Amino acid sequence: MTIEQVPTWHQPSHPDYIAVKTYKSGSFSKYATASTRIPAGTTIAEFSTAATPATAKAYSSLQVSETEHIELNSDLLYSNHSCDPNVIFDTDSQTVTTIKDIEEGEPITFNYLSTEWDMAQAFKCECGSKKCLGEIQGAKHVPTKALAGYFLNSHIKRLLEKRDGGLQ
Ligand SMILES: [Zn+2]
């Protein structure tokens, strides 16, 4: 399925750090890469400035609390999933920060399970990481034990605690 993404924002939205590239084929045609070499620990974006509440959970929305989803309305939308990512989307501080050095041209990725509880569209991950979790459909569908060692946002931790009855 091809989804034609029509940006509603001025592009590029984060030229200092993000360059959007286009796949020659595939279902999601665009992806975010580093526009320059970015050291670990760099905050590359604040997503609150452009974000708006999402009217419905969608492939493009980001979950920011136990009940709320937002549309990013920026090139951050094109950040792909990896089970061994190089940035984190922190929904408490509403910032995107690198957790590894990223080379220019390298895809910018985050772990969708760190924000999403039960995704609108599941997909099979092909990140190739040794830590790959396989089918990605939200943290709800993964045992808490399997999520150990991954950065998780506070709302995902709370939802896991509720699901597991407080047991870890
Ligand atoms: Zn993976």
Image (tube, helix red, strand yellow):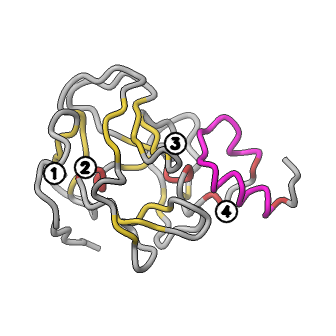
Vertical comparison of 167 with 42: above or below: below
Instruction: State whether label 3 is within 8 Å of ligand 1.
Output: yes
Residue 80 or 132: which is nearer the viewer?
80
* Residue carrying label 4: 141
Location of residue 34 in the rendering, given as x and y in whole percent from the top left corner: 24, 33
Location of residue 93 in the rendering, given as x and y in whole percent from the top left corner: 48, 44
Q: Gap between marks 3 and 2, in whole Å?
A: 16 Å
In the rendered image, which quarter is residue 36 located in? top left
Identity, as a three-letter code, of the amino acid under mark 3: Cys
Secondary structure beneath label 1: strand
Disc number placed over residue 31 in the picture, else none = 2
Secondary structure beneath label 2: strand
Instruction: State whether label 1 is within 8 Å of ligand 1.
Output: no
Residue density around tag 4, few if under 14, some if 14–19, many if 20 or more, within 10 Å: few
Instruction: Tell me what residue is drawn at x 21 percent, y 26 percent.
Output: 104
Q: Gap between marks 4 and 1, in whole Å?
A: 31 Å
Q: Earlier in the sequence, mark 1 or mark 2?
A: 1
* Residue carrying label 3: 83
Disc number placed over residue 22 in the picture, else none = 1
Residue density around tag 2, few if under 14, some if 14–19, many if 20 or more, within 10 Å: many
The single residue placed furthest to the bottom in the displayed view is 55
Instruction: Tell me what residue is drawn at x 44 percent, y 44 percent.
Output: 110
Q: Gap between marks 3 and 1, in whole Å?
A: 22 Å
Q: Earlier in the sequence, mark 4 or mark 1?
A: 1
Identity, as a three-letter code, of the amino acid under mark 1: Thr
Identity, as a three-letter code, of the amino acid under mark 2: Tyr
